[in-house]
Image (cartoon, rainbow, N blue to C red):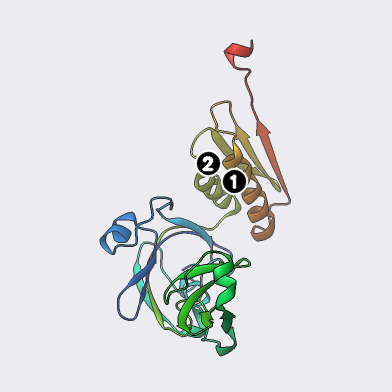
């Protein structure tokens, strides 16, 4: 059984009550249901159980799940994308759209000063924009499977290393310190920096036994600069 704070490698698919897939870790499932995104990264995700890294209803279900066993859970709106809020439906003057050379049409999803909104109707000089999440107020269904669970500090350190770095990085846990070593073959571009910061933050926040994180990085001068 999984406990709060355990790391789990999670496969899941989220569907509406009508069966429409809106989120999945499976590329095959995404293609089959017409929601495949070439820019998305598919495959099991590493999650800290009980720490609100997934929807509350799914998070609760993780704490009663058995690794390597498929499970389906129905999640009420309150523990999914929240209830619909009438106050989040706003009237926007059509002139604002014309200033941006946009012809507003029902169903369009646009960015309004950093907040995404869906146009629900266009009447005269006013446009009704719904800023609720598209699945707000709906019951959703998650089918999921914990591929593997990680319980000890050493297992958690290894899990996040494997999840964050493709090659060239090894890890170990000793005393109260998690140590990562990145050899010259590791790709140390922007993605590496982001992954490194994620490792540090996750371990210090969610693994009480880890008091310090150390990164050793190896760099070799290219031959054309020798």
- Residue at x 40% of width, y 53% of height: 42
In the picture, the quarter occupied by the C terminus is top right
Q: What secondary structure is marked by label 2? A: loop
Up the image or down, 158 lies above or below 25; here it is: above
Q: Is residue 56 left or right of residue 202?
A: left
In the figure, residue 187 lies in which quadrant? top right
Q: Position of residue 90 (x, y in %)?
A: 58, 83
Q: Position of residue 207 (x, y in %)?
A: 65, 57
Question: Which sits in the foreground, 46 or 170?
Answer: 46
Question: Which sits in the foreground, 210 or 87?
Answer: 87
- Residue at x 46% of width, y 81% of height: 120
Residue at the left extreme, as displayed:
32
Q: Position of residue 121 (x, y in %)?
A: 45, 83
Residue at the top extreme, as displayed:
226
Residues tagged 1 and 2 counted as in contact (Cβ below 8 A):
yes
Up the image or down, 19 lies above or below 47; here it is: below
- Residue at x 59% of width, y 88% of height: 87
Whole-angstrom CA distance, mark 1 to mark 2, is 7 Å
- Residue highlighted by disc 2: 165
- Residue highlighted by disc 1: 195
Sort mark 1 into few (<14), some (14-19) or many (20+) by Cα contacts within 10 Å. Answer: some
In the figure, residue 4 lies in which quadrant? bottom right
Residue 4 visible, this angle: no
Question: Which sits in the foreground, 103 or 42?
Answer: 103
Residue 141 visible, this angle: yes
Sort mark 2 into few (<14), some (14-19) or many (20+) by Cα contacts within 10 Å. Answer: some
- Residue at x 46% of width, y 68% of height: 1
Q: What secondary structure is marked by label 1? A: helix
């Amino acid at each position: 059984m999984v406990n709060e704070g355990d790391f789990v490698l999670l496969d899941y698919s989220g569907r509406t009550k009508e069966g429409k897939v809106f989120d999945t870790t499976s590329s095959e499932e995404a293609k089959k249901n017409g929601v495949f995104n070439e820019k998305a990264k598919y495959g099991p995700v590493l999650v800290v159980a009980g720490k609100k890294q997934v929807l509350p209803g799914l998070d609760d279900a993780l704490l009663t799940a058995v690794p390597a066993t498929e499970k389906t859970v129905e999640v009420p709106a309150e523990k999914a994308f929240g209830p619909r809020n009438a106050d989040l439906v706003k009237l926007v003057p059509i002139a604002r759209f014309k200033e941006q050379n946009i012809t507003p049409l029902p169903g369009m999803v646009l960015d309004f000063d950093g907040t995404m909104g869906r146009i629900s109707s266009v009447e005269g000089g006013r446009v009704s924009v719904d800023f609720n999440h598209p699945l707000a107020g709906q019951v959703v269904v998650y089918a999921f499977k914990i591929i593997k669970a990680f319980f000890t500090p050493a297992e958690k350190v290894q899990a996040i290393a494997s999840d964050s770095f493709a090659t060239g990085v090894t890890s170990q846990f000793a005393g109260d310190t998690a140590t990562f070593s990145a050899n010259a073959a590791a790709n140390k571009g922007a993605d590496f920096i982001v992954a490194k910061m994620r490792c540090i933050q996750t371990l210090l926040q969610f693994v009480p036994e880890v008091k310090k994180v150390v990164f050793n990085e190896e760099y070799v001068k290219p031959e054309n600069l020798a």
